[in-house]
Amino acid sequence: MGDTATQRNAVRDAVERVTEMMADEKDYLTDLDSAIGDADHGANMNRGFEAVHEKIGEMGDAPPDELVKTVGITLVSEVGGAAGPLYGGSFMTASAKFEDGITAESSVAFAEAFLEKVKDRGGAAVGAKTMVDALTPAVHTYKKSIEEDDLEPVEALTKAVDACQRGVNFTTPIRATKGRASYLGWRSVGHQDPGATSTLFIVEAIRETAVEYLGDGDLEPDATSPTVPDEDAEGEQGETQEES
Ligand code: ADP
Ligand code: MG
């Protein structure tokens, strides 16, 4: 996706979007967490991304993988509770996949490494009513869309957002078996998981950033479209959108 400068700007813009989204949705996330947790998820994510935004702003022309790694380090150090180390550790570890730049291929590797780390660290499988329920379908859908269906990254991300939303919806009727909500046992049933919801906001912000950089003008449902770029041809679309 474009040259290093474009990728760096894209990461910065994605961080900006997530930061705004967490500020806008702070009360909503807190309401969700007050039903089945300790009412701090909105404040946690808002505080975490405010700090991330500030740190990233001080990083000059650091490469994109360094920026993503800093997102993780900052979340780990600024956000207590379950979500900070889970999100933070995953951004830190998965950032290594962007060492050679952000491409369709490396973004799939990033997404997979991210999910893997959340599962490793938190020990939650799908169905435990956590962020894993939203992240898993999003990552699997993204991977399949890129690798099997040959879709463009923006199309793949649009499908990932849909899958993520279904994952969020799936958390409502089930019982929590991991995290703070599990203390409630069956009383957790009927409430949407806050962490799954913040995951959706992050995936949405990434999609919006991808649309800005790659455009969503011709999202033909035709997967065999000749406009699907190959690895080497990447960048042309991104660069036309670059503005700073
Ligand atoms: P805390 O629960 O410590 O107050 P937050 O409120 O910030 O932390 O985050 C709660 C969210 O973290 C939950 O809604 C859930 O999605 C996620 N979570 C909690 N425990 C786990 C776990 N073991 N694995 C994956 N996600 C988890
Ligand atoms: Mg909480």
Image (cartoon, grey):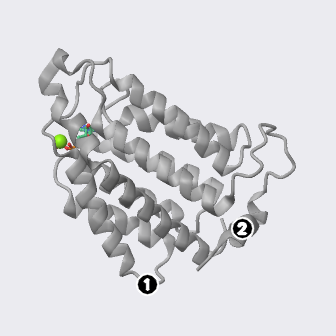
Give percent across and percent down for residue 3: 65, 75
Q: Residues within 10 Å of mark 2 (few under 14, many from 20)?
A: some
- Position of 210 relative to 116 (above/below): below
Residue 1 visible? The answer is yes
**What residue sits right under mark 2 in the picture?**
235
Instruction: Name which residue lies at 32% across and 47% down.
Output: 25
Instruction: Name which residue lies at 42% across and 65% down.
Output: 16
User: In the image, what residue type sits under mark 1?
Assistant: Gly
Residue 60 — which label?
A: 1
Q: Is residue 51 left or right of residue 201?
A: left
User: In the image, what residue type sits under mark 2?
Assistant: Gly
| Kind of element beneath mark 1 | loop
Give percent across and percent down for residue 165: 47, 33
Instruction: Name which residue lies at 31% across and 18% down.
Output: 174
Residue situated in front as seen by the camera: 164 or 113: 164
Quadrant where the C terminus lies?
bottom right
